[in-house]
Amino acid sequence: MAIPLRKTDEIEKLRTAGQAVAKTLHYLQQNVKSGMTLLEVDKMGEDFLQSLGARPSFKGLYGFPNAICTSLNEVIIHGIPSDTVLKEGDILGIDIGSEIDGWYGDAAITMPIGQISKEDEALIACSKDALYYAIGIIKEGMRFKELSKAIENFIRARGYVPLIRFCGHGIGRKPHCEPEIPNYLETPNVKAGPKIKNGMVFCLEPMICQKDQEPVILDNDWDVVSKDGLRTSHYEHTVAVINGKAVILTEVN
């Protein structure tokens, strides 16, 4: 399947959807605190997203029951909001999708709840730094496999491992489309597969495990944890390739 090349006006529509996500994530970073439940975080995020004129695109997507993925501590992605109460020292992954006028945005952060350990600070820094490193090295003509390998090398150099079997993805008129962008190299040849071109729009999302890359899906059929049962972290941005470089669409302007 061909990877769509977006026109300037289409990228601006994707930026509009992305800005709604960025502003909602920023709002939650400023307001989520210990003592709140994950369902309260979900409601707060959904209400704010809708106040910006966006539809929470995760709600009902593939059967997901809520507006926001709230992935707590050991949960790396797809956490379903619950009555669990946040406490000091937790780390919380928040992943948000939006839709405005048929165009989609998607981004994620992992945030501390109050004071957290140095180990958890380093864990969160790895996913965030890996994301910005990857965005910074993107250039037209680079292969996606080269990008995946570079992300994997960065994560491993920090002493962590990337989650397998989940990946970044294209985005546009659908929340998920081609290409798939793993945070690791699946095949030995980095010079195979599609090249990055101007006009492509996609989501990069490093998912960091401490020891074991193997995912385990919990009994609710959504929450994903590492097989080692240790804490994890996740960061994501939507980017567009413009004039040969990646431009972030999900940062607050």
Image (cartoon, helix red, strand yellow):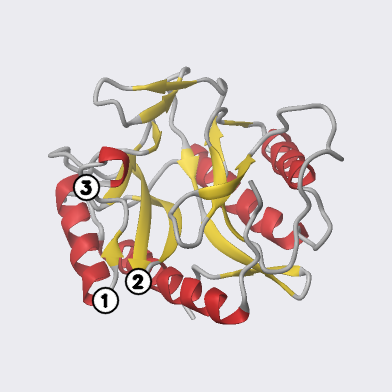
Q: Are marks 2 and 1 in contact (CB under 8 Å)?
A: yes
Which marked residue is nearer to the observer: mark 2 or mark 1?
2
Say if residue 253 shows up in the picture.
yes
Camera-nearest residue between 251 and 174: 174
Q: Residue at x 56, y 39 (%)?
A: 167
Camera-nearest residue between 200 and 223: 200
Q: Identify which amino acid the numbered label 3 is placed on.
A: Asn
Going from N to C along the chain, the mark reached first, 2 or 1, is: 1
Horizontal and vertical percent position of residue 1 = 63, 46
Answer left or right for 17 relative to 209.
left
Dot 3: within a 10 Å radius of its alpha carbon, few (fewer than 14), some, or many (20 or more) residues? many
Q: Residue at x 31, y 22 (%)?
A: 218
Q: Residue at x 23, y 43 (%)?
A: 87
Answer left or right for 166 relative to 46.
right
Q: Residue at x 79, y 44 (%)?
A: 146
Going from N to C along the chain, the mark reached first, 1 or 3, is: 1
Q: Are marks 1 and 3 in contact (CB under 8 Å)?
A: no
Horizontal and vertical percent position of residue 206 = 57, 44
Q: Where is mark 2, residue-wise?
A: 100
Q: Secondary structure at mark 1?
A: loop
Q: Which mark is residue 53?
A: 1
Dot 1: within a 10 Å radius of its alpha carbon, few (fewer than 14), some, or many (20 or more) residues? some
Horizontal and vertical percent position of residue 51 = 21, 75
Going from N to C along the chain, the mark reached first, 3 or 2, is: 3
Q: Secondary structure at mark 2?
A: strand
Relative vertical location of residue 120 with respect to residue 239 in this rendering, above or below: above
From mark 3 to mark 2, how far is it between C-alphas? 18 Å
From mark 2 to mark 1, how far is it between C-alphas? 7 Å
Q: Identify which amino acid the numbered label 2 is placed on.
A: Ile
Q: Where is mark 3, residue-wise?
A: 66
Answer left or right for 49 relative to 205.
left
